[in-house]
């Protein structure tokens, strides 16, 4: 029986919203794929785009950034900056023909355990359909 | 119709005389311009406070030894009125630096010019530049691209200065007969009046300028297409295969001013455990690692402010067309926010501001 490909999705989750949402999914015993590798940050704006690039080049099949919904950032405007940075990084990937579909930004609040499970499930499915990140095989990077 | 000062000498001679006069009459306390230096046909930027030293000045020479924006940033703290002669892309880069608190505009009398591009560095060997000059000036006068200029210059459509106090009109003009200084600000008019000759009203050779711009846009399109054909991860490895990680591109880039650059730090160094695990899964590891990380990372930090000066390609020891790559992607990231680097000092750098309602498809 062929082993099912379980993508590895490095996920930067902000402590106040997304990480708590993920935690709620856990305590509510909601099912979501084991592909999510959470990294807690204080705010989604802590994420330097270079972290995302390093994860991608390091071979992660997907990179997820989870933050509070616009207007609800614990630090007022952090997620607005995240949104712009993500747009720029997305455009850079697009411009160079790199697989921008492997990067995703999702607003998930602390009360949205179900949403977290759904986003994880959908993103995992999307990545599984794309296959493993070819960067995994690259010696030169 | 703009206010201008016409000097009945060649453009270079007229401008040199004008600069000397500003210094002699104490309108400024220093001049920043290109100079002949050494004995080997070298050209450098220099700060001059003694009019005697102006004999070596060649303000309009088509050469960029370093992006002047970096140098202006260096002595911007002097807070003395200084007249500077810089190219339009250097001016745009300096405006980008001013936005990042790396300089201020008020102390400078900014003189720029409609730019025909600069020679590649190789022109400084064995007096090649002097041989190339006549053809170059002919091209500028007739509004064509010289063969000897940088690739990024051939593709540059922003060759009419933005934010200058004075523009020397070169493209489409009789450069060996006349020096036309266009005065855009009150400061410029005051300085020009001190020269002692009457001012007039004149117009730039806009038809020739527009034709050259169309030519350049076509070249840009052509250059970008070549880069675009090398796409994806394989494309990146093809483009940056020879990169040795010297970071020369970052050092000469006027936008890359960070003293604590992520890529000059140990932030991304791998611990040996990580190297071992990489070897376990791949069987080999290129050293030094993180070449593509540096290139993509630098793009994510500054691409939208790239002015396409071409210094990076000039200094690359591996002859990678860094400038073409950064200019192309930079244009796309800047366009996300309708941004043009250096257009307006009041226009904030895209990553420093936000709108509450924008990019609504992201995150949902």
Image (cartoon, coloured by chain):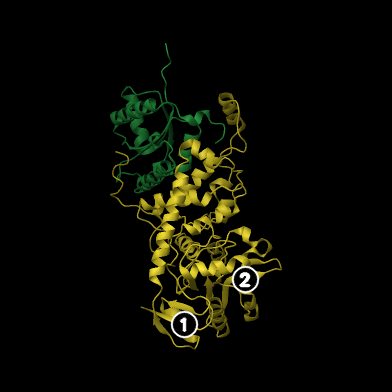
Chain colours: A green, B yellow
Q: Which residue is mark 1?
A: B6
- Secondary element at image label 1: strand
> Is B111 on the left or on the right of A91, as rendered?
right
What is the x, y in percent for residue B155?
A: 46, 57
Q: Quadrant of the C terminus of chain B?
A: top left
Where on the picture, by quarter, is residue A105? top left
- Determine the CA span between mark 1 and mark 2: 23 Å
Confirm whether residue A15 shows in the render: yes
The residue carrying pointer 2 sits among few (fewer than 14), some (14 to 19) or many (20 or more) residues within 10 Å by Cα, namely many
In-front residue for pair A47/B192: B192
* Residue farthest along the right direction in this orientation: B39
> Is B123 on the left or on the right of B86, as rendered?
right
Confirm whether residue B344 shows in the render: no
Above or below, B66 against A53 in this view is below
Co-location on one chain, circles 1 and 2: yes
Marks counted in the figure total 2
In-front residue for pair A45/B98: B98
Subunit bearing disc 1: B
Q: Residue at x 59, y 73 (%)?
A: B58
Q: Which residue is mark 2?
A: B35
Subunit bearing disc 2: B
Q: Quadrant of the N terminus of chain B?
A: bottom left
- Secondary element at image label 2: strand
* Residue farthest along the top direction in this orientation: A1
Mark before the other along the chain sequence, 1 or 2: 1
What is the x, y in percent for residue A5?
A: 42, 21
> Is B231 on the left or on the right of B355, as rendered?
right
Where on the picture, by quarter, is residue A38? top left
């Amino acid at each position: 029986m062929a082993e099912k490909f379980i993508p590895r999705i490095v996920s930067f989750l902000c402590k106040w919203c997304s990480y708590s949402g993920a935690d709620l999914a856990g305590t509510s015993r909601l099912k979501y794929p084991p592909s999510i590798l959470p990294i807690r940050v204080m705010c989604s704006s802590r994420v330097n785009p270079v972290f995302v690039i390093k994860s991608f080049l390091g071979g992660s099949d997907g990179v997820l950034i989870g933050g509070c919904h616009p207007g609800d950032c614990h630090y007022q405007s952090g997620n607005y900056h995240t949104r712009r940075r993500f747009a720029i990084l997305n455009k850079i990937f697009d411009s160079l023909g790199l697989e921008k579909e492997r990067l995703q930004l999702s607003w998930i609040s602390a009360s949205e355990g179900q949403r977290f499970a759904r986003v994880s499930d959908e993103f995992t499915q999307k990545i599984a359909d794309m296959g493993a990140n070819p960067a995994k095989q690259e010696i030169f990077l | 119709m703009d206010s201008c000062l016409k000097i009945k000498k060649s453009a270079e001679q007229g401008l040199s005389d004008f600069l000397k006069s500003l210094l002699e009459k104490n309108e400024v306390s220093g001049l920043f311009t290109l100079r002949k230096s050494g004995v080997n046909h070298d050209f450098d930027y220099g700060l001059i406070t003694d009019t005697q030293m102006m004999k070596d000045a060649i303000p309009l020479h088509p050469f960029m030894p370093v992006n002047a924006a970096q140098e202006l940033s260096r002595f911007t703290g002097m807070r003395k009125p200084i007249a500077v002669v810089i190219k339009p892309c250097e001016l745009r880069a300096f405006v980008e630096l001013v936005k990042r608190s790396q300089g201020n505009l008020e102390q400078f009398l900014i003189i720029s010019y409609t730019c025909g591009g600069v020679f590649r560095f190789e022109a400084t060997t064995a007096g090649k530049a002097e041989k190339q000059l006549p053809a170059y000036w002919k091209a500028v006068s007739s509004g064509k691209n010289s063969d000897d200029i940088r690739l990024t210059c051939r593709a540059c459509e922003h060759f009419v200065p933005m934010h200058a106090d004075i523009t020397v009109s070169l493209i489409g003009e009789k450069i060996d007969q006349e020096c036309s200084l266009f005065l855009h600000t009150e400061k410029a008019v005051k300085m020009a009046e001190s020269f002692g000759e009457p001012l007039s009203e004149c117009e730039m050779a806009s038809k020739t300028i527009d034709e050259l711009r169309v030519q350049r846009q076509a070249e840009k399109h052509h250059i970008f297409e070549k880069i675009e054909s090398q796409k994806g991860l394989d494309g990146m490895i093809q483009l940056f295969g020879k990169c040795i990680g010297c970071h020369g591109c970052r050092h000469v880039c006027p936008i890359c001013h960070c003293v604590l650059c992520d890529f000059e730090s140990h932030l991304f160094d791998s611990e040996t455990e990580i190297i071992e695990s990489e070897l376990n899964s791949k069987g080999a590891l290129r050293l030094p690692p993180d070449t593509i990380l540096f290139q993509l990372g630098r793009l994510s930090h500054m691409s939208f402010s790239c002015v396409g000066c071409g210094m990076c390609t000039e200094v690359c020891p591996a002859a990678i067309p860094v400038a073409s790559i950064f200019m192309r992607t930079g244009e796309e990231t800047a366009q996300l926010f309708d941004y043009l680097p250096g257009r307006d000092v009041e226009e904030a750098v895209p990553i420093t501001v936000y709108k509450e309602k924008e990019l609504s498809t992201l995150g949902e």
